Amino acid sequence: REITMGLAPPDCESRDQLSRNDAASNSGQSWCLDIEAGWEEGVPQSPEHRAASEVNEQSWPDTAQDYQKSFKTSRTQSWSEVERRSTIKTMQSMHFSKPELFRAVRASVPLQGFGRALRRGQEIYKQSFVTEHIDEFWSHSWHAKAWQKILMLMLLQNGPPAMVAGMCGSLLAALLTSMELLPSFSEGSYGGRIYRYSCWSLLAGTISSVVVFFLWRSRRRIFLDKACINQHDASVKSEGIAHLGAFLKHSAAMVILWDPSYVRRMWCVFEMAAFIQSHGNGSQSRLQFRPIILAPCTIICYMTCCIVYAITLNFPSDAESQSGLVRLALMPVVITVIASFAIHAFRKHHRNLAVMKEQLKTFSVNKAMCSCCSMEHVDTATGAAISCDRTAIEEVIRSWFGSMERFEAHVQYKLYANIERQLGCFGTPLPLMIFALCPGIWGEIDMVSARFRAGDLEHALGRALYALGWCFGAYPVLFAMLPSLGRVLHRKRATRFLDILTTAAGAACFLMAFCCIWALWIGCSRLCTGNETAGGALFMVLTVTMTMLIIFAEKLNACARDEASK
């Protein structure tokens, strides 16, 4: 050991003596016996001993190299174990050992170029900065579809400012239209009066919201593993990963971009455990659960509202306009086609939700997969052995919760109930529903502007009541029908043809519901002919009441399903 470490034994002054002493040591003799046998300088050696020394000296290089190799291997293993224990302590402590490790990045950076960093692996670590707090921790699985994650993040970060910008643009266009500073596109008759219609509010609101949606630069400080942990320096990268718990402890909220692969990834499970442990009871309100499949569903509903009102305003069809009803014969076709895409997306969403609920109800850390285990703990690039992340993560979670069973029970009950509340009774969070229905509000503003343009304030008030009925009664009902139909028809059929027929049947049911609400609007208008204010108030009361009853019934069904599952 002393030879390998570069330390000379006592009473040895030359390499020749060092080699002889090591040779004697390799021949099974001790240091003390070597000196007594005459190896000390100035003491003659026996011929037999000198011959044995020469033989051992010739064989020394190979023997010493083997010894040195075995020593380095054992030392490396010992040092790896020391590093492993140090890493586990760092993970358990949730404290930064170096201030420069605590980094964040603006939310706009990873979303630039429609999430180029997430799609193509663009390097953005240099745009991160040292910080003292993090607004959101973005937790996701790299096995999920990148474009769905990007779209969901843009809805969360850019959706609210896009809605505000769209509403401002729509109101400005409505003001200019009422002052007749903008031209009209079509005419329609109602109650013996001619109204000139335009879609400036819808157009201004849509363009403003789309521009802000793609160009908004959120200043929120977020954590994204690719942006806040150095990906090129292996030692710094390992150090950053060991401090994931510290990042989560100093994050105000955690956004889970869920897909079916999320709870099957070991590091995603660790992130959930770290956030729950560091925030205690407050973690329930700070943890945002967003299934990424809802992003395309929301965009499809948004586009549906835009197309429906573009047809309505360019081919006006008031309740008493027979020619307008004929021109709007195109609308059922458009609604059926677009509703088919929406129902197909919601069917997949509810299949994923069924998988998610089953995963949470039967959650077990043992079911999570780790990349190191899939590679059999061998670095495919260098062939070197790598330590197991699973054992370290499991040890950290046990130290936090006392046992693995307590953490699994927390996920199975508390986290599951929290996710159910966030998704709502229709499986879609309220902010996403509002974003999808914004074009309907802007289209109704155009309808009211047509009355103001004609100077008919009474009918403008009545139309405003109709608009409230559509926006807060009819549209929520129709929007709620899409996920409801998706839940009822969520099962995958045996063949593609049967699957298409199932989606078409759901679209037909949606079209029937739309026609029923349209007939209710016409009935209220006919019943209160000449008094649009009364008709609008009646329509608003009926549709809002219907919405409340449907929500109440859906909540009862959800409670019944939960009791049955328990």
Image (cartoon, rainbow, N blue to C red):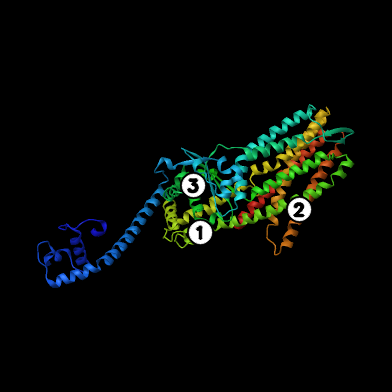
Residue 399 in the image: x percent, y percent? Answer: 41, 52
Q: Are marks 2 and 1 in contact (CB under 8 Å)?
A: no
Name the residue type under label 3. Answer: Phe
Q: Amino acid at mark 1?
A: Met
Q: Residues within 10 Å of mark 1 (few under 14, many from 20)?
A: some
Q: Is residue 358 left or right of residue 449?
A: left
Which residue is disc 3 drawn over?
Answer: 275
Residue for point 75% across, 28% down: 175
State the quadrant of the N terminus: bottom left
Q: Secondary structure at mark 2?
A: helix
Where in the figure is residue 90, as x and y percent of width and height?
40, 48
From the viewer's perspective, is residue 487 above or below residue 58?
above
Name the quadrant containing residue 468: top right
Q: Which residue is mark 1?
A: 369
- Residue 274 appears in the figure: yes
Question: Which mark is first along the chain, 3 or 2?
Answer: 3
Q: Earlier in the sequence, mark 1 or mark 3?
A: 3
Q: Which mark is residue 507?
A: 2
Q: Measure the C-alpha gap from mark 1 to mark 3.
A: 20 Å
Q: Which SS class for mark 3? A: helix
Q: Are marks 1 and 3 in contact (CB under 8 Å)?
A: no
Q: Is residue 425 in view from this perspective?
A: no
Give the mark, 2 or 1, whose residue is nearer the N terminus: 1
Residues packed near mark 3 inside 10 Å, few (<14), some (14 to 19) or many (20 plus): many
Q: Type of residue at label 2?
A: Ala
- 106 vs 59, left or right, is right
- Judged from the image, the secondary structure of the residue bearing numbered disc 1 is loop
